[in-house]
Amino acid sequence: MGTSSRRSVAVILNRNAQRVSPDIIAGARGILGPGAVFVTSSRAEAREAAREIAARRFEVACTGGGDGTFIAAVNDLDACCGEEMPMLMGLRLGSGNAIGEVCGASPPTREGLAADIARAASGEPPRPLSLLRVDGRLTHSTGVGLDAKFNEDFRAIVKNWLGRGVLAPLIHGAPGLVLAAVMRSIPRLLREGPFNLRVINRGAPASLLGGSGHGGGDADRPAGAVLYNGQAVIACASTVATYGRGLRLFPFADSLTDRFQLRVSSVGPLDVLPNLSRIFSGTYRNPRRLSDFAVTAVRLELAAPAPWHVAGDLQGPTTEFDIELSPRKLQLLFDPRRFTSAACSRSPAS
């Protein structure tokens, strides 16, 4: 796609997303015209929107919703466009906005929407975003254990309950995360305990990362090697550092070249609470109970069925699933204030 001074922009707005209001919909239509704004309420409508965007060869597609909305659009557009997929930008209009943070999206107001659309239409160059392939789908993140359970808890406590009432302005961002963790996720962890997990390397030699994100001193572990075998409370992977809502759960992901970060933790709730600020900032380290790997492909094997997620969208219980780095890369409008060209080109960590 070109980078002319004025690019054609389409906006996909998920009507079910937390911040997609009638005012936001009207604002988008007022800026772009109704023909470039696709308001969807179902997967079928989302797929039809992708087909129309592909047919009309829009140069940029902005997604209004959370990470699930963004990843659904990625997969739909990939199916329709292949290598001709438009540039993408995630708007900050959902409850889980890791991609919105990566893109540096504006606050979820009419003014913020106008600023983001103007930026998408400008000549700002995109940069490549690496993706995972999980269960046949492209995504930037996936996980099992507390990772998946927390998504369920956040939805119950914040999205479907307190976030819909008068307290909503007070619990966006970090306060909502802490509230869901304290009210439900940590009590669940205490009640249910860890799960038994085995992680097998299925790709290029894997490296155990040290506290700085560099190799931890262990030799690279070849395909077939068991990277982890024991109890865990969370196992998750990502190609971006942020989990959304300001939480840097994958602090090494942005600096990896041709790898993604896999994080496995058995850190208990008594360690989580006093270290919440360090966990949010991505500076928490615990070599005995927190392991980070740079990998290209792994299989996660669980002793008992457990729910897992793809970009925050819960999946049915499973006992195993594969995660691999996809050769497919997106052209994404990154936040120029937080991501340098070197970081976005995934400079080596070791």
Image (spheres, rainbow, N blue to C red):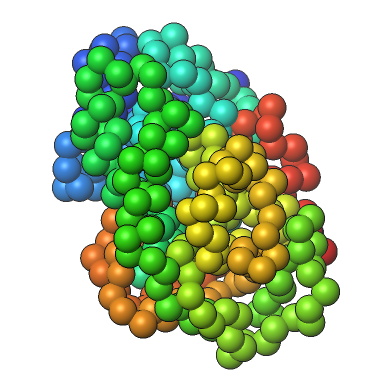
**Compared to 271, does 166 lie above or below?**
above
Q: Quadrant of residue 51?
A: top left
| Residue 33 point in image, percent of width and height | 30, 16
Where the C terminus falls, by quadrant? bottom right
Of the pair 53 and 349, the residue shown nearer to us: 349
Is there any visible trace of residue 202 in the rendered image? no
| Residue 23 point in image, percent of width and height | 26, 12
Kindly identify the residue that appears in the image at 39 percent across and 50 percent down: 186
Q: Quadrant of residue 278?
A: top right
Of the pair 34 and 172, the residue shown nearer to us: 172
Of the pair 207 and 5, the residue shown nearer to us: 207
Kindly identify the residue that appears in the image at 76 percent across and 58 percent down: 211
| Residue 159 point in image, percent of width and height | 27, 34
Of the pair 157 and 130, the residue shown nearer to us: 157
| Residue 125 point in image, percent of width and height | 64, 33
Kindly identify the residue that appears in the image at 62 percent across and 63 percent down: 290
Is there any visible trace of residue 244 in the rendered image? yes
Q: How many marks?
A: 0
Kindly identify the residue that appears in the image at 72 percent across and 53 percent down: 255
Is residue 326 toward the left or the right of residue 258 in the image? Answer: left
**Compared to 331, does 95 lie above or below?**
above
